[in-house]
Amino acid sequence: MIVLLDNGHGGLIAGEYQTPGKRSPVWEDGSQLFEGEFNRAIVSGIVQQLTRETIPYVVITPEYRDVTLETRVKRANRYFGDEPCFFLSIHANAGGGRGFEVFTSPGDTLSDPIATIVGEEYQQVFPERPLRTDYRDGDLDKERRFYVLTRTRMPAVLTENFFMDNEEECRTILMSEEGRQRIVDYHVNAIRRVRDELF
């Protein structure tokens, strides 16, 4: 099984953020989260743990510039059919809220059991934080027609990890070393279970 890792949005190049928007407010202490930097930090942490455990992976977007959604999907789809694989896109949320969400494309697909495992592992690591769910179709994931979920040929999930416009979550989880490590941990725990239980 190969994990295809996608860090959403652009990163920082020479101190300049590559994606318009996609950032927290500037907090009173002058700090600010850039989502693309956070996404890359989480993927980097996942990569370190997968490397130690010899779980195969590919980082679909190693660049710091903002790679188009079409390019992300084309890169991922090159791996379809060669080896069993799934696509995992990492994000931080915004829009006023708390907690964690995991998304799949609409309908009953092979992505659904992967998303369920991700949600369960999130609850194990963050039992004190909300898991934002939609059980109308019988499972915990939310369904949206996001480009990277509908155009990828393999199972695909997208995680929205806490809210960068919620000051408490942003500063204590998204911007803290401990918080980021816990986020890495539940993704890696989920990847391990997906390998063992579904592949």
Image: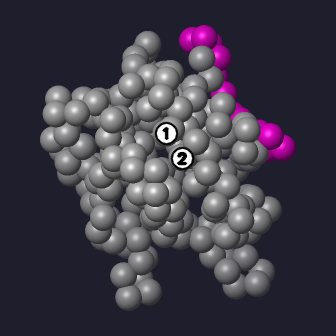
The residue that label 1 is drawn on is 191
User: Relative to 184, is 189 above or below?
Assistant: above
Q: Residue at x 20, y 48 (%)?
A: 75
User: Residue 147, relative to residue 136: is it above or below?
Assistant: below
Question: How many residues crowd mark 1 within 10 Å: few (<14), some (14–19), many (20+)?
Answer: many
Which residue appears at 76% of the width and 84% of the height? Answer: 29
Residue 88, horizontal then vertical, whole percent: 42, 42
Would you say residue 188 is visible in this rendering?
yes
- SS state under label 1: helix
Helix, strand or loop at mark 2 = helix
Mark 2 sits on what residue? 188
Between 33 and 54, the one nearer to me in the picture: 54
User: What's the amino acid at mark 1?
Assistant: Ile
Distance in Å between CA atoms under marks 1 and 2:
5 Å
Is 79 included in the stretch rendered in magenta?
no
Which residue is rendered at x = 77% and y = 80% of the image? 28
- The quadrant of the image that shows the N terminus is top left
Identified by mark 2, the residue type is Val
What span is colored magenta in the figure? 127-138
Task: Classify residue 158 as left or right of residue 29.
Answer: left
Instruction: Give the residue at the far front of this rendering.
Output: 53
